[in-house]
Image: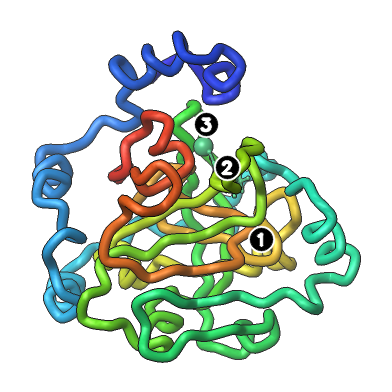
Amino acid sequence: MSLITRRSMMAGGSAATATLVSGCDPVSMSDAQSLRRILDFGQFMSMQAHRLLLARQPLVREYKESDMSPEFPPNGTERPNGMAYFQHMMSNFASFRLAVDGMVKKPLLLTLDEIKAMPSRTQITMHNCDEGWSAIGQWTGVPLAHLLQSAELMPEARYIVFHCMDEMVRTPDGTGFYYESIDLFDALHPQTILAYGMNGKALPVAHGAPLRLRVERQVGYKHAKYVNRIEVVDRLTHIARGRGGFWEDRGYQWYAGL
Ligand SMILES: Nc1nc2c(c(=O)[nH]1)N[C@H]1C(S)=C(S)[C@@H](COP(=O)(O)O)O[C@H]1N2
Ligand SMILES: [Mo]
């Protein structure tokens, strides 16, 4: 585990970045997982093939209520900057809409109430941040698979991109927003949900209100908070710097399985 946190990396500039890129492997992977990374399932597998594989996918461990951490620390953005998010917060996200678009036959634009009316899943899981902490929390949300099935993926679909409302760095082209991506393998996993509830209450702003991803087999930075757009794509190269996520664009591994 590197002792360089992402915050110090941002502050430290290119020297720290170089150390991270060459020397830091945020998670140690088992042979099976590194094999999976080499195969890069998202690259060539169809949704049907993913479905077949998923039938045999193990679930990650789920915990009891008594296991829940008394304190679950927020990390990264704790409140997005800017007027748009502030207004959402003030109006309790009444005019918030989630867009599901890209390589789908039926693009969606959903209110929070519409999302809450969909099938839901509640799970108590352990969150693992590569900066060296973990916490157990309860999450409630709509299975991502349900959203994607409603939008009807095109056969070319390979990756799901989560666009977030927090701008991490100001860039002239507006590519400094947090974003993340996963393959269909993780997207269709039954424990992958878009959560609007945490520990039995509405998802707090510090933890990504109104919607955040839970992708339980991956480390912390894959769990995009403040999601307002889900884009279905066949490749990641045209988004921001092309590596599939804000931190991936800065040297972190795209596949960050536990
Ligand atoms: N939009 C957005 N999502 C994000 C981050 C962020 O800064 N912005 N930080 C990531 C990191 S590094 C972690 S560990 C988790 C933290 O989730 P939490 O705030 O609920 O603890 O969110 C992830 N998702
Ligand atoms: Mo993290």
Q: Nearer the viewer, residue 103 or 217?
A: 103
Instruction: Name the residue beneath numbered marker 3.
Output: 133
Instruction: Name the residue beneath numbered marker 2.
Output: 176
Task: Give coordinates of residue 79: x percent, y percent.
Answer: 76, 47
Name the disc covering residue 83, or none.
Answer: none
Q: Earlier in the sequence, mark 2 or mark 3?
A: 3
Residue neighbourhood size for the residue with mark 1, other residues' Cα within 10 Å, grouped as few (<14), some (14–19), many (≥20): some
For badge 1, the amino acid type reads Asn
For badge 2, the amino acid type reads Gly
Task: Give coordinates of residue 136: x percent, y percent.
Answer: 54, 48
Spatial CA span between label 3 and label 1:
19 Å
Is 129 positioned to the left or the right of 258 in the image? right
For badge 3, the amino acid type reads Trp
Label 3 within 8 A of ligand 1 by Cβ: no
- Quadrant of image for the C terminus: top left
Task: Give coordinates of residue 76: x percent, y percent.
Answer: 62, 38
